[in-house]
Amino acid sequence: MDSPRGYLKLAWVIFLHLHLGTQLHAVDITSKMTRICLFFFLLCNFSYYRPGTAELDWWQTSVIYQIYPRSFKDSDGDGVGDLKGITSMLDHFADIHVQAIWLSPIYESPMADFGYDISNFTAIDPIFGTMEDFDEMIEAMHERGIRLIMDFIPNHSSDQHEWFLESRQNRTNDYANYYMWYDPNPECVDEGNEPEECPPNNWVSVFSGSAWEWEPMREQFYLHQFLKEQPDLNFRNQTVYQEMADAMEFWLKKGVDGFRVDAIKHLYEVEDVYQDEAPNPDYEPREGEQQAQYDSLYHNLTTDFEEIHIVLRKFRQELLDPYSQDGRYRFMVTEAYSDIDILIRYYGTDDEPEADFPYNFELIPLNAEILSGTQIHEMVDLWLQSVPEGRWPNFVLGNHDNSRIASRIGVEYLRAMNVMLLTLPGTPTTYYGEEIGMENIWVSYNDTQDPYAKNNPCCWEEYTRDPERSPMQWTPDPPSAGFSETNETWLPVNENYQEGINVEDQKPERDPSSTMALYKLLAEERQKHKAIQQGTNRYGIVDE
């Protein structure tokens, strides 16, 4: 039974963790952020519990932990993480009381965007292992009570997918309408320009440059809202929808417990594509910029169309709900960086539910420059006030596309940020390594892996996502912190792995004041107590 006495005890334990930890890591315990988060914790949990609330499902009671598979654990010494490596480390999740894993893409892929360019939606890429390795991994997860959420990418495939290889051949074969093919802009051609110089419009790729690529065999352009190696699928073709539904069902039959639906806002575009998107008057070009940038335009013609919700409802009604009848609920979360009034529509309605929640990125912009109790209050409250009645909130502080917490906000605030994340109402999502306080690495342009950065040599450090994707730090042992037996890992290991930033050194039995020890305490208490998970919320600011 939750009680005020129990929460005073828990709050005091957390305070001692913060105090002892700050002594060890030279952080000022009188910092405003630490006091704000502690007070925020007390307010949330005294005011949030409502007796008699219905039992919660697994996706509501557990932390969701994101694994970026290339960087988690390498079992075969090639410098890239793999499925056997993940399986070998599953006891770590039991130790820190995590019961749900979101796994970034492991599908067959040429790796132009490290797995988000898929050449076979129902196969495992050999760099990660085999289907047998996958089966062993998910069986081991379920034996430990861990649920698996797969990344699912319906917006596009790889240009090496058999569908695209056939589709690009001509305009009449069975795959001709699987992708977004359009003729050159007629006005441009009429002005005497070559067809390949006349894309349908001015649309810009998320990764910069034109969103159109000329295909000489068809003498048409295809749309790619991301890399040119990631052609957009045509969801107005019902056969394409069925292909993707079949892929989702394949993994449901394998026992997958849910999906994170990637880049969902890009699924549809305006039907008449011969229209330009309006320029963004607030956009300021960067010095040396050579390509058009995504933020330079408004995207009212290429994002957030109503048809997206029809697809999500069908995923729910035709796949997730039927597979939930066996007593294991099948979960869906959507990913879109959109305004909050658009995001909350992904919940659907009571009669036609869609996602269990859309990922909430309101806290992602938080950094050292804007950090304050007032700023956090505004970010948290905006989401909680916007969530429809009866729907479940969630909070995210980091992921594979954004700088790590310790680097973005500050090492001195890392513990306070974990306290906040794991005691806010709803479901928290943790990026791998945040439980031990991993920090960004630095990668030179010549060694850069991220295509987003490579596309923008003028300002690659602003665009690169490599720094937050470095290998997981398991031990203080060379050559690669227990991630791999080789020192030639796909990205460098952060050199601070020998300075206590690793799992082995932070185990509670070795260092009860460590960042991981506090994380484990928070995750365990969060699982136990409804007061941390659900109800209403009030705020207070400690400024003395």
Image (cartoon, grey):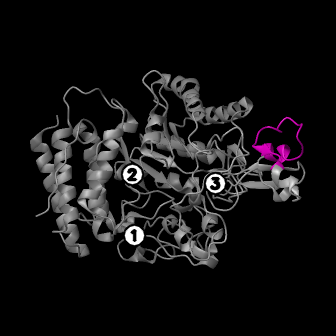
Q: Amino acid at mark 3?
A: Gly
In the orientation shown, which residue stands out farthest toward the front?
Answer: 191
Nearest the camera: 391 or 81?
391
**Residue 248 position within the rendered picture, expressed as x and y whole percent measured from the top left:** 62, 35
Q: Which residue is mark 1?
A: 407
**Residue 289 position within the rendered picture, expressed as x and y whole percent measured from the top left:** 62, 72
Cα distance between the residues tagged 3 and 1: 25 Å
Q: Which residue lies at the image location 61% right of the left edge and 52% below the top edge?
A: 278
Query: Considering only vertical position in the picture, is 373 above or below 3?
Result: below
Does any portion of residue 486 appear in the rendered image? no
> Are the residues tagged 3 and 2 within 8 Å (C-beta)?
no
Looking at the image, residue 164 sits to the left or right of residue 289; the answer is right
Q: Which residue is mark 3?
A: 115
Query: Considering only vertical position in the picture, is 193 above or below 102?
Result: below
Cα distance between the residues tagged 1 and 2: 18 Å
Q: Which residue is mark 2?
A: 362
**Residue 158 position within the rendered picture, expressed as x and y whole percent measured from the top left:** 72, 51
Q: Amino acid at mark 1?
A: Ser
Callout 2 secondary element = loop
Nearest the camera: 389 or 124?
389
